[in-house]
């Protein structure tokens, strides 16, 4: 009669759970004994059951654990072979957000020109969501900003106006999205207007971020200041055409089609009343409307008061305003159309300069 040789029941070791800042996950090393055939593990919030995961083999393994901050968990593991299974090893742990280094968000201002800016918001695992805004530094009030940020996250149901945009992930915001000031369900944003005019410090801007924690703790406000630079010279490197048809001019409105050459990446337009400081003043203070950021024709309709009988429509094409492969601020060529409101409608197309 043959006697079956008795083997060894496997064992398993579990290291301490540690948080990886670079990967934003919790990690644990599991080392089954060499006679292990299969081992099992699970990670669950304390007092919850969960489902076991199986791993074939006996190689030491580092596991990534998807967990929330400031919450109690238990990691459990055991090994098994043909002769039986080991005892279950249990490691309780908790990742405290207060012990993690760094801020909830990091603000980076880049690609700054006289007319445009990019603001990168890098959200760390310590942050659940954040609200971002930009405004002149002289107009910033932290208590008012906090109140508006909280309203942005939870708009009034009866009148759901959302002052600012928010996000639950890292994102880049531009001058078009650094202020919303629209209804909650409106996909558009009002944006902010940059100015290089240093009168009353209007060229001094501030980016403010209201960040809510992912776990325990209080919301925090982070700020970053920047100064809008003066625009570069406009020496006529972009071709822009403006077309205003007779049928598109009425007593109170007009429509204009603006087309730019192949080198143009964006078209800016503005309507000013004749008799002002002219195109130079418009360049620094009045470039207000983006019609199109593609190399195609762009049409826009602007309403004006009937009392305005004489005006100038100006358009500018920019090579590098938001084209990152080019210069920091591209050259632009301004063209304008002078027209009278009245009946019969008349207008005069002038050459650019």
Image (spheres, rainbow, N blue to C red):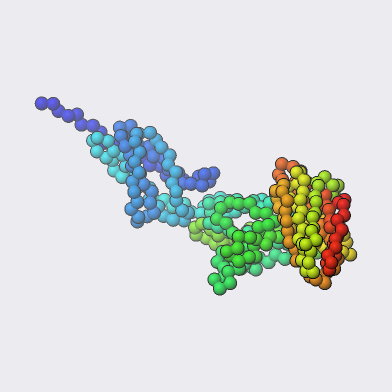
Tell me what residue is drawn at x 43 percent, y 46 percent.
65
Pick the residue in front: 142 or 251: 251
Tell me what residue is drawn at x 77 percent, y 58 percent.
256
Tell me what residue is drawn at x 77 percent, y 53 percent.
258
Image quadrant assignment for residue 314: bottom right
Q: Using the rendered image of the protein, determine whether residue 152 is visible from the camera's viewpoint.
A: no
- Quarter of the image where the N terminus is located: top left
Q: Is residue 40 left or right of residue 228?
A: left
Q: Is residue 39 left or right of residue 256?
A: left
Residue 119 % position (x, y): 67, 52
Residue 205 % position (x, y): 73, 59
Q: Using the rendered image of the protein, determine whether residue 326 is visible from the camera's viewpoint.
A: yes
Pick the residue in front: 259 or 183: 259
Residue 24 % position (x, y): 51, 47
Residue 159 % position (x, y): 58, 72
Does 155 appear above or below 97?
below
Pick the residue in front: 250 or 204: 250
Q: Is residue 167 left or right of residue 71?
A: right
The tally of labels here is 0
Image quadrant assignment for residue 227: bottom right
Q: Residue furthest top?
A: 1
Does 217 appear above or below 263?
below
């Amino acid at each position: 009669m043959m006697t079956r040789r008795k083997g060894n029941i496997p064992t398993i070791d579990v290291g301490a759970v540690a948080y990886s800042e670079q990967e934003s996950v919790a990690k644990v090393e599991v080392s089954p004994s060499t006679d292990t055939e299969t081992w099992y593990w699970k990670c669950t919030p304390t007092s919850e059951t969960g489902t076991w995961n199986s791993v074939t083999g006996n190689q030491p393994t580092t596991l990534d654990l998807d967990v929330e901050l400031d919450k109690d968990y238990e990691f459990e593991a055991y090994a098994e072979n043909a002769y039986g299974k080991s005892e279950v090893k249990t490691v309780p742990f908790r990742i405290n957000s207060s012990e993690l280094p760094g801020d909830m968000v990091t603000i980076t201002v880049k690609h700054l020109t006289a007319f445009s800016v990019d603001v990168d918001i890098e959200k760390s695992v310590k942050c659940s969501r954040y609200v971002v805004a930009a405004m002149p530094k002289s107009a910033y009030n932290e208590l008012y900003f906090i109140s508006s940020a909280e309203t942005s996250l939870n708009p009034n149901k009866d009148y759901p106006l959302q002052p600012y945009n928010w996000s639950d992930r890292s994102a880049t915001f531009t001058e078009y999205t650094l202020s919303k000031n629209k209804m909650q369900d409106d996909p558009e944003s009002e944006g902010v207007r940059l100015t290089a005019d240093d009168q009353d410090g209007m060229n001094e801007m501030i980016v403010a971020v209201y960040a809510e924690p992912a776990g325990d703790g209080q919301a925090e406000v982070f700020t970053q200041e920047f100064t809008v630079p003066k625009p570069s010279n406009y020496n006529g490197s972009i071709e822009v055409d403006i077309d205003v048809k007779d049928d598109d001019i009425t007593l109170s409105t007009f429509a204009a089609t603006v087309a730019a050459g192949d080198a143009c990446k964006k078209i800016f337009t503005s309507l000013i009343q004749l008799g002002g400081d002219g195109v130079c003043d418009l360049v620094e203070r009045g470039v207000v409307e983006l019609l199109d950021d593609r190399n195609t024709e762009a049409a826009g309709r602007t309403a004006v008061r009937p009392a305005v009988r004489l005006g100038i429509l100006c358009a500018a094409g920019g090579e590098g305003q938001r084209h990152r492969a080019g210069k920091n601020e591209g050259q632009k060529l301004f063209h304008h159309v002078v027209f009278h409101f009245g009946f019969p409608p008349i207008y005069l197309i002038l050459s650019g300069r």
